[in-house]
Image (cartoon, rainbow, N blue to C red):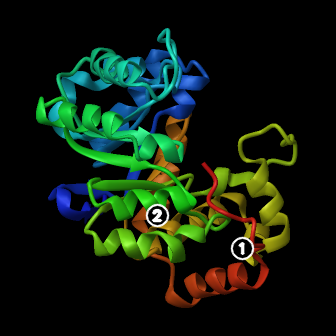
């Protein structure tokens, strides 16, 4: 499979349109042998972006055990800011420093390509001491680039600070605020843009979803949006959703997690079909503009 590569903003990197997200394998305790199958097969097929975080359970450790020996084949993204299993509070200089070093140890490498602030509260985003910890890690060679994973007005503030190389932000058929509010400004700054939650957790397919589920806000939104394609074959509908996100101008890569090796191949096949036809993309945008409520802001 020939995976499309895209320019990753001012980093100079070229990244695969489809990236792998490590939250599901970490939170759900997926066996190492399954992670090896998923990631090994993905790298063999041309995927070169792997995204994880300090608080995704065993995610970093599983990725480190599975593919650290193939380090030169992929662009590795992780995040910092939360204590996770460390003793201490989130968003303190000490926690941040220890979190960065712990991530490198778990991933079994000496540097990542991108270290990102992980959904920082506004006060943390503008804390000069915390920012210095991140830039010091870059200067020490622990990360090549620094970024911010955020949404809404906080994401826009991160862009306007002009110190981050990249932005990871929610973009999907159920989460389009960023397309108008944040992404144009990020593109103007030359930032590499990573789309998280690009298939809106496939929330319309989960009839058993509860209010406590991470994807519940998207399920509620999609009941109102009621796109025509949501009533088609489920796999085809997921493909439309993913291709929509990758059709948003400026998006370099879309991060999708899975615990099933076969799901990776299905997602890759969708991406291989290319962007949505322009009329279909604009129809999704028009439906959003007609239906979206003022409180449908970017979801973390």
Looking at the image, which is closer to me, 207 or 169? Answer: 169
Looking at the image, which is closer to me, 96 or 223? Answer: 96
Quarter of image, res 50: top left
Looking at the image, which is closer to me, 247 or 101? Answer: 101
Q: Nearer the viewer, mark 2 or mark 1?
A: 2
Does residue 140 appear to the left or right of 232 in the view shown?
left
Name the residue at 27% across, 31% down: 133
Does residue 200 appear to the left or right of 253 in the view shown?
right
172 relative to 67, above or below: below
Res 204 seen here: no
**Real-space Cα distance between discs 2 and 1?**
31 Å
Quarter of image, res 218: bottom right
Name the residue at 28% across, 69% down: 189
Percent position of residue 67, x then y: 29, 25
Percent position of residue 11, x then y: 18, 56
Name the residue at 25% across, 68% down: 190
Quarter of image, res 112: top left
Circles 2 and 1, Cβ within 8 Å, touching? The answer is no
Residue occupied by mark 2: 156
Percent position of residue 2, x then y: 28, 58
- Numbered badge on residue 229: 1
21 relative to 239, above or below: above
Dot 1, how many residues are within 10 Å of its Cα: few (below 14), some (14-19), or many (20+)?
Answer: some
Marked residue nearer the N-terminal end (2 or 1): 2
SS label for mark 1: helix
SS label for mark 2: helix
Res 99 seen here: yes
229 relative to 268, above or below: below
Name the residue at 54% across, 44% down: 263
Percent position of residue 72, x then y: 15, 35
Does residue 250 appear to the left or right of 270 in the view shown?
left
Dot 2, how many residues are within 10 Å of its Cα: few (below 14), some (14-19), or many (20+)?
Answer: some
């Amino acid at each position: 499979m020939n995976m499309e590569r895209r320019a990753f903003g001012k980093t100079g990197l070229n990244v695969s349109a489809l990236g792998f997200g490590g939250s599901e394998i970490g939170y759900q305790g997926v066996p190492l042998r399954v992670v090896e199958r998923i990631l090994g097969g993905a790298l063999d097929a041309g995927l070169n972006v792997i995204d994880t975080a300090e608080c995704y359970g065993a995610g970093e450790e599983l990725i480190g055990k599975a593919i650290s020996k193939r380090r030169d084949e992929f662009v590795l993204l992780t995040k910092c800011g939360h204590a996770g299993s460390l003793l201490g509070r989130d968003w303190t200089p000490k926690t941040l420093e220890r979190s960065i070093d712990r991530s490198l140890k778990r991933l079994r490498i000496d540097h990542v390509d991108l270290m990102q602030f992980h959904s920082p509260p506004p006060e943390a985003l503008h804390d000069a001491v915390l920012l210095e910890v991140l830039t010091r890690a870059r200067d020490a060679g622990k990360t090549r680039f620094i970024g911010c994973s955020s949404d809404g007005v906080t994401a826009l503030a991160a862009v306007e600070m002009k110190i981050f190389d990249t932005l990871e932000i929610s973009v999907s058929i159920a989460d389009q605020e960023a397309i108008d509010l944040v992404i144009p400004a990020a593109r103007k700054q030359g930032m590499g843009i990573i789309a998280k939650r690009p298939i809106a957790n496939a929330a319309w397919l989960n009839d058993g979803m509860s209010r406590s589920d991470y994807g519940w806000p998207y399920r509620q939104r999609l009941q109102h949006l009621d796109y025509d394609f949501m009533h088609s074959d489920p796999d085809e509908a997921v493909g439309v959703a993913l291709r929509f996100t990758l059709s948003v101008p400026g998006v370099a890569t879309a991060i999708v997690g899975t615990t099933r090796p076969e799901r990776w191949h299905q997602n890759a096949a969708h991406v291989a079909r290319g962007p949505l036809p322009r009329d279909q993309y604009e129809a999704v945008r028009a439906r959003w503009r007609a239906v979206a409520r003022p409180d449908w802001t970017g979801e973390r």
